[in-house]
Image (cartoon, rainbow, N blue to C red):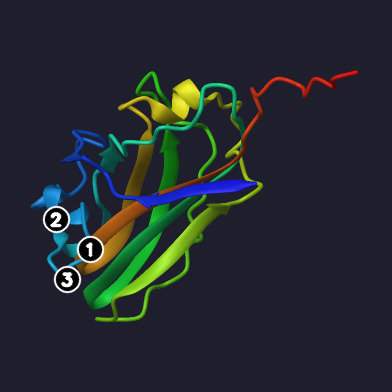
Amino acid sequence: MTDIGPNNPGTAVSDASPPTAQVWNNPDNIKISDNTYASSVSSTFGSTRYLKATNFGFSIPADAIIKGVSVGIEHGHIGPFAADWAVQIIKSDGTLGDTNKAKGTVWSSGVDETYSYGGNDDLWDEVWTAADINNANFGVAFIAYMYGTVLVDNIHITVHYTPVSSSPLPTFLP
């Protein structure tokens, strides 16, 4: 098996949904791990909008067999409470996958930590081709549930695949 990544997103946005949820400020700050954060603030218990990361720049060989997708989200919070609420794959057509990998674990306050989702044999209940993964629309969407301020420093993806050899069979000379 071959791994490519972790790759960082080329595009990051605070999505418009859910419309009544808290927006993400400075979503571009999730593109690299540098202790500069995207943030969202709520003075009551509530959720953020989707923080969407796409355009990961994968170049997996066309005939590769995708075996798994691993997502890492480096985050922290300031205030009484924060937890992941939704972690969903974004498919190449821009729609969200049905599988939510959120753990619902309460985050440690003020600590910059990375949670991992998926894995080397986890396809997120999808069927993938290399073209799907290489597509600029492929990525991940994240919602936090919080009271206070949530911070995301970086989102990255690693793809696990098996290359299919395209080299010809050896010829034997008489």
Q: Residues within 10 Å of mark 3 (few under 14, many from 20)?
A: some
Toward the left, the furthest residue is 26
What residue would you read off at disc 1? 153
For the C terminus, the quadrant is top right
Q: Position of residue 17 (x, y in %)?
A: 25, 34
For the residues bearing labels 2 and 1, Cβ distance under 8 angstroms: yes
Marks 3 and 1, the one that precedes in the sequence? 3
Name the amino acid, label 1.
Asp
At 38% from the left and 74% from the top, the residue drawn is: 107
Q: Is residue 45 visible?
A: no
Q: Nearer the viewer, residue 22 or 138?
A: 138
Q: What is the number of the mark on residue 29? A: 2
For the residues bearing labels 3 and 1, Cβ distance under 8 angstroms: yes
In this picture, residue 122 sits left or right of residue 109: right
Q: Residues within 10 Å of mark 2 (few under 14, many from 20)?
A: many
Classify residue 89 by image quadrant. Answer: top left
Q: Position of residue 53 (x, y in %)?
A: 28, 42
Marks 3 and 2, the one that precedes in the sequence? 2
Q: Is residue 164 visible?
A: yes
What residue would you read off at disc 3? 35
At 59% from the left and 22% from the top, the residue drawn is: 63
Name the amino acid, label 3.
Asn
